[in-house]
Image: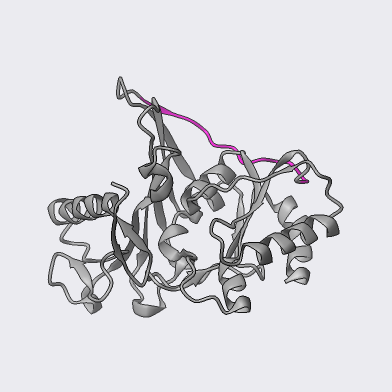
Amino acid sequence: MARVAAVTSADTIYAIDRVSEATVLAWFKRHWPQRWPVELVMEGLEGHAVTFPRGTPVARTLFKCILDPIDGTRGLMYNKRSAWSLVALAPQRGAKTNLSDIVVAVMTELPTSKQGLADQLSAVRGRGVLAVRTDLRTKLRTKFKPRPSRARTVAHGFASFAKFFPPGKAWLAEREEKLWRRLGAGAEIFDDQYLSSGGQIYELLMGHDRFIADLRPLAFAQLRVKGGLPCHAYDLCTALIAQELGCVITAPDGQPLRAPLDTTSPVAWVGYANPALARRIGPKLRALL
């Protein structure tokens, strides 16, 4: 499952991804309601529009569905850490459809082989969040209530800049260190490089992390790095769930995320566990950038 199957304009595709893509397409063909024509956006489908019912012109679809079958492929295929299946739905506005248009989002945990429990969270804009934990042995499903951190500082908590790969790592780490210095933060700030944007969103909404910044597109642009691996819209399509729980997730300049729902546009983003942290950290980060 760790074999490289393809390298596309969106990402590196592994054998495990090919299995999930076939499953997703089969599900849409079998189950998607014909009265709600939809355009499906997913890595691996670049180059042509995929709609359901099949053959529906994009102009006649009502919704755009963006989906990442496995976000966190690299961690899951080596059995290190859960990955996430991410999916979101927005009213169709053609090329103008963006992350801020999303009205429904679902994230489902894809657990490691020794894991006994797995979580699923979903949200409808303005209607809150449904969270369910499944016992994988008994199939018993139990509701739970996620609670983001209410801390007003990052001291003695997890707060990270995403720097998964060598390109841009020094640039990102330098700004991370400067930010904490400007905030007067001490040494007790814990770094967690969860190689999954959906997983990072989960850590924020569960109260595990207080702050996450993924500024890889800014680093790549500044350093003129070509071929770097940034976050994409499909990686961040379930941010709505965290926002419904009170987390603040924005572009680095503090504006709403408006990246187009495609598979290639890079997305830089910042997540705060609560508004107090956003007010404390956000202005310092923007000044630094």
The reply, left or right, for residue 155 in relation to residue 67 is right
The reply, left or right, for residue 17 in relation to residue 224 is left
Q: Is residue 289 above or below residue 120?
A: below
Q: Quadrant of residue 41?
A: bottom left
Q: Main secondary structure of the magenta part?
A: loop
**Numbered-mark total:** 0
Q: Quadrant of residue 64?
A: bottom left
Q: Nearer the viewer, residue 153 or 22?
A: 22
Q: Position of residue 58 (x, y in %)?
A: 23, 76
- In the rendered image, the residue lying farthest to the top is 138
> Which of the colour schemes (rainbow, by chain, secondary structure, one colour) is used?
one colour
Q: What residue lies at 52% left-to-right and 33% top-to-bottom?
A: 145
| Residue 81 shows in the view | yes
The reply, left or right, for residue 114 in relation to residue 151 is left
Whether residue 151 is in magenta: the answer is yes
Q: Position of residue 154 (x, y in %)?
A: 75, 46
Magenta stretch, residue numbers: 141-153
Q: Is residue 117 above or below residue 168?
A: above
Q: Is residue 69 above or below residue 260?
A: above
Q: Position of residue 28 (x, y in %)?
A: 19, 55
Quarter that holds the C terminus:
bottom right
